[in-house]
Image: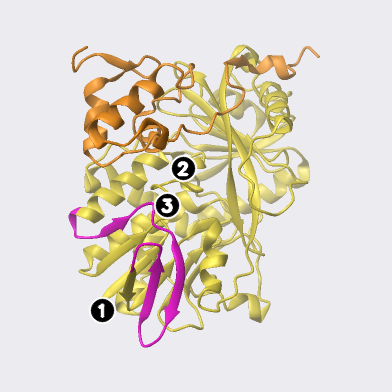
Chain colours: A yellow, B orange
Amino acid sequence: MNDVAVIGGGVNGCALAYELAKKGVRVTVFEKGYLCSGATGRCGGGIRQQFDTEDNIRLAMESVKIFEKMEKELGYDIEYEQGGYLVLAHSDEENEKFKRNVELQRSMGLNAKFLEKDEIYALVPILDIEGAKAVGATFCQTDGHANPFRVTEAYAKNAEKLGVEIKTFTEVKEIKKGKTFEIITEKEKIKADVVVNAAGCYSKQIAEMVGVKLPNKLYRHEILATESLKPVLKPMIISFRDGIYFCQHKTGQIVGGIGNPDEPSGINASSSFWFLEFMAKTITRYIPAFKNLNVLRQWAGMYDVTPDARPILGKTNVKNFFVVCGFSGHGFMVAPITAKLMSELIVDGKTSIPIDGLSINRFKKGMLRKEGTVVG
Amino acid sequence: MNHETIICRCEDVTYQEVVDAVDEGYKTLDEIKRKLRCGMGPCQGRTCLRLIARIIREKTGKRLDEIKMPRTRPPEKPVPLGIFGGKDE
């Protein structure tokens, strides 16, 4: 194994660079802006294991194992907290579905549980269960959140210590495929034996440079942050029906977002008043006490969404061109395990946890099992 | 001014911390904002960003007009969530 070029300086690109370097590979990371300038730096930082497909649950559980040891391994305070995720159900139908999800999650060893209304109240007294129109919930204590900037920086700095070269403000303009690859930027041409496309919302364009077509579509998702408070909210609160998620970060601010079902596909990082108003109305319905809480900032980022809302990982029909994309809003939380598995695939040719189900080929076969628990 | 002088009052960031970040290779306001949280507090960088731009200029020789300001985030001033529609409506 010789030189690997990783395109994308988000959490997935930097984590992969670190894992590859640990295996003795020479890596160069190309990032068109600064590290985290794309979706990573715009995300809410949530780390959830409560999914409804086995692949996603397994990846998330393995990822959490790495997050739990990350501060020690990388020597960085990543502001990691395991306050749990409280997933609200709003109908009997949703309740039944959530109970089935919990059954699947528990069969895989995840400590998720179903909560009745009084148990929700005991867990989060500040939440207005009637206002939120919740009839039940699931909860998993080991879910949580971390600071995406810190995690990415921790990976990047440790990667650099192992010899990885990170080129920020360096846009890849063209990739030439011969016996090896040639990465062409504004400044230079660099040869690489292996190319990994971890370019987030630009992965479609990068894949097209070598003739690989990705089925991904981009959607804007908006988010806001409030002023900092004393700790009042332990778990991340989410609802698939309302499309809302919010939690309190270690630094005190409430951070959260809400999806717009009518959002058209396309790149758009601007903020809308529609979002601010809708988010304010919904979050104060969930937690009335927040009506006096000052909102400081709102911003937007892109979800790189696949037809089944699960990532695309692994080989492509172009030899030695790998993809790590299509995370559909969940790229941060699974980055640690994704990086580990991708480094195994690239260096050893096989992975310790099967990821064949996430290969790009699944779209040709039409064997899609859609992830049903997507939020925001 | 000394090394302990507060540059960002919202997030308690000192002159020395900014200098260290620039030395570490963070030479844009966007990067320093994400690393140190300068500009993420209630004042949205009204106080600190121009001061930090001057530190970047001193350390790197860049002209001030080459140092891009981070994108302004609405609502620009702190506004209570209830203004946009609380339960009373």
Query: Do discs 3 and 2 share a chain?
Result: yes
Q: Image quarter for residue A257?
A: top right
Question: Eyeballing the image, is B81 above or below A161?
Answer: above
Asked if residue A340 lies left or right of residue A245, the reply is left
- Dot 3 and dot 2 residues touching (CB under 8 Å): yes
Q: Is residue B7 visible?
A: yes
Residue type for callout 2 = Gly
Is A239 located above or below residue A5 in the figure? above
Which of the labelled discs sits on residue B88, or is there none? none
Residue range in magenta is A161-188
Q: To which residue does mark 1 refer?
A: A1
Q: Quadrant of the C terminus of chain A?
A: top right
Q: Is residue B4 magenta?
A: no
Disc number for residue A41: 2
Specify whether disc 2 shares its chain with disc 1: yes
Q: Assign the N terminus of chain A to one quadrant of the image.
A: bottom left
What's the CA distance linking mark 2 and mark 1? 31 Å
For the residues labelled 3 and 2, the Cα–Cα distance comes to 8 Å
Marked residue chain, label 3: A
